[in-house]
Image (cartoon, rainbow, N blue to C red):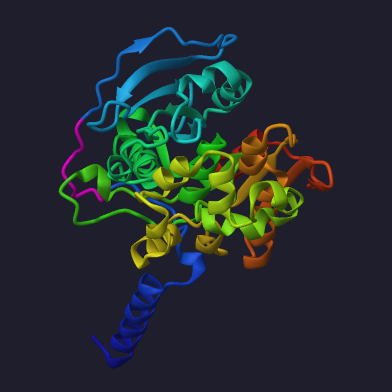
């Protein structure tokens, strides 16, 4: 081989290593590819098909319920698989809400039947998942046991595993693993945002082959979302809402607010700590940083659709959880980092309306089709 050939080869190898090791934002959402041909074949996923819980209106699709994706009791998913499709199909995953203490995957069938039909009609598979729920003690209950549940990361890591599971079994499910989108409501919206903004959680050395799969996606939809799960930051985000109630609540910091409205145990359980004193420990500061979608967000993340609806001061908990200021914070942060976003807030006094008028189904579809 001549010297010029060696030079060109060295240059190509150097550039490859540079891009492979780069930590730039654009590298975070690198498309996922199927296994190399020399990898051992993956086992087939056995599915039992049953009648779909929604009317399919003539769409040729099959439905499988309660497919286990892990060992925990609520590690199950439902999936619709479109047929008559020439190529492997993109995938949309719905994550239910319920404050990480309730809710069920069945809400997708009950509330989003039109979404499901629209995706199936366009040869997009659709899954709805359950995940582990947190148990919040009553006043005077065992907060050490509550903290031992692991906080909100326990629930959200289940959702990450569900995504990895479907990627692992892409052949059995006929999925295009490069084109996956997530959406959900409330807690499910926050989980979708977290997965969309978090660096890839694939572990190439994991003994469990499922955990070697990527957690990166092409788009996320957040309906009635929270902006970040570093709850301490809610004081700054919601200050215009909290300040009018400061005299009643006793302050504006989120711990004082939680104590005033009787949700201190929920806040502590959510953050995985047994007492207020632990919130400011370095361990919990690190924990909160790992669930802070606003700070995790960068220009290489999945494009975001966010839509929060009107809330009423008659229900303070709902107001704090779903206020339009959360949607505005997400949208503003996306603009700040240079990430594509479509945003809406229907909160009077805090309106946000994307000039496109685009809805979440269209948004997700155009990023995976």
- Of residues 203 and 233, the one nearer the viewer is 233
- Of residues 46 and 251, the one nearer the viewer is 251
Residue 342 appears in the figure: no
**Prevalent SS, magenta region:** loop
Residue 39 lies within the magenta run: yes
Residue 46, by quadrant, is: top left
Residue 289 lies within the magenta run: no
Tell me what residue is drawn at x 37 percent, y 65 percent: 281
Q: Is residue 286 above or below residue 320?
A: below
The extreme bottom residue here reads 3
Q: Which residues are magenta?
A: 36-43
- Residue 25 lies, in percent from the top left, at 50, 67
Residue 157, by quadrant, is: top left
- Of residues 304 and 155, the one nearer the viewer is 155
Q: Quadrant of the N terminus?
A: bottom left
Q: Is residue 252 above or below residue 180?
A: below
Q: Quadrant of the C terminus?
A: top right
- Residue 264 lies, in percent from the top left, at 48, 44
- Residue 262 lies, in percent from the top left, at 53, 38
How many numbered callouts?
A: 0
* Residue 80 horizontal side relative to residue 118, left or right: left
């Amino acid at each position: 081989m001549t010297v010029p050939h060696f030079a060109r080869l060295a240059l190509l190898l150097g550039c490859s290593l540079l891009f492979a090791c780069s930590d730039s934002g654009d590298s975070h959402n690198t498309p996922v590819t199927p296994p190399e041909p020399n990898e051992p074949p993956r086992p087939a996923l056995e599915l039992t098909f049953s009648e779909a819980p929604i009317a399919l209106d003539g769409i040729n699709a099959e439905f499988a319920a309660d497919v286990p994706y892990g060992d925990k009791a609520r590690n199950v998913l439902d999936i619709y698989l479109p047929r008559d499709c020439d190529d492997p199909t993109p995938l949309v995953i719905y994550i239910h809400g319920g404050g990480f203490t309730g809710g069920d995957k069945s809400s997708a069938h009950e509330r989003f039947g039109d979404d499901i039909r629209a995706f199936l009609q366009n040869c997009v598979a659709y899954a709805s998942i359950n995940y582990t729920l947190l148990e919040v003690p009553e006043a005077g209950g065992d907060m050490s046991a509550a903290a031992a549940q692991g906080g909100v990361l326990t629930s959200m890591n289940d959702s990450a595993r569900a995504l990895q599971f479907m990627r692992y079994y892409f052949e059995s499910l006929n999925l295009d693993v490069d084109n996956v989108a997530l959406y959900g409501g409330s807690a499910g919206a926050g989980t979708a945002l977290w997965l969309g903004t978090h660096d890839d959680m694939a572990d190439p050395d994991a003994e469990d082959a499922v955990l070697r799969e990527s957690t990166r996606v092409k788009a996320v939809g957040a309906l009635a979302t929270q902006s970040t799960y570093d709850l301490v930051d809610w004081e700054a985000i919601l200050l215009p809402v909290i300040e009018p109630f400061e005299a009643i609540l006793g302050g504006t910091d989120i711990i004082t607010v939680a104590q005033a409205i009787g949700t201190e145990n929920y806040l502590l359980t959510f953050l995985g700590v047994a007492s207020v004193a632990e919130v400011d420990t370095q361990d919990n500061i690190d924990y909160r940083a790992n669930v802070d979608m606003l700070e995790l967000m960068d220009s290489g993340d999945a494009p975001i659709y966010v839509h929060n609806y009107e809330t009423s001061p008659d229900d303070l908990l709902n107001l704090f959880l779903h206020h339009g200021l959360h949607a505005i914070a997400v949208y503003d942060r996306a603009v700040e980092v240079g990430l594509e976003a479509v945003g809406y807030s229907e909160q009077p006094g805090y309106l946000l309306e994307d000039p496109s008028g685009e809805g979440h189904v269209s948004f997700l579809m155009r990023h995976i089709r």
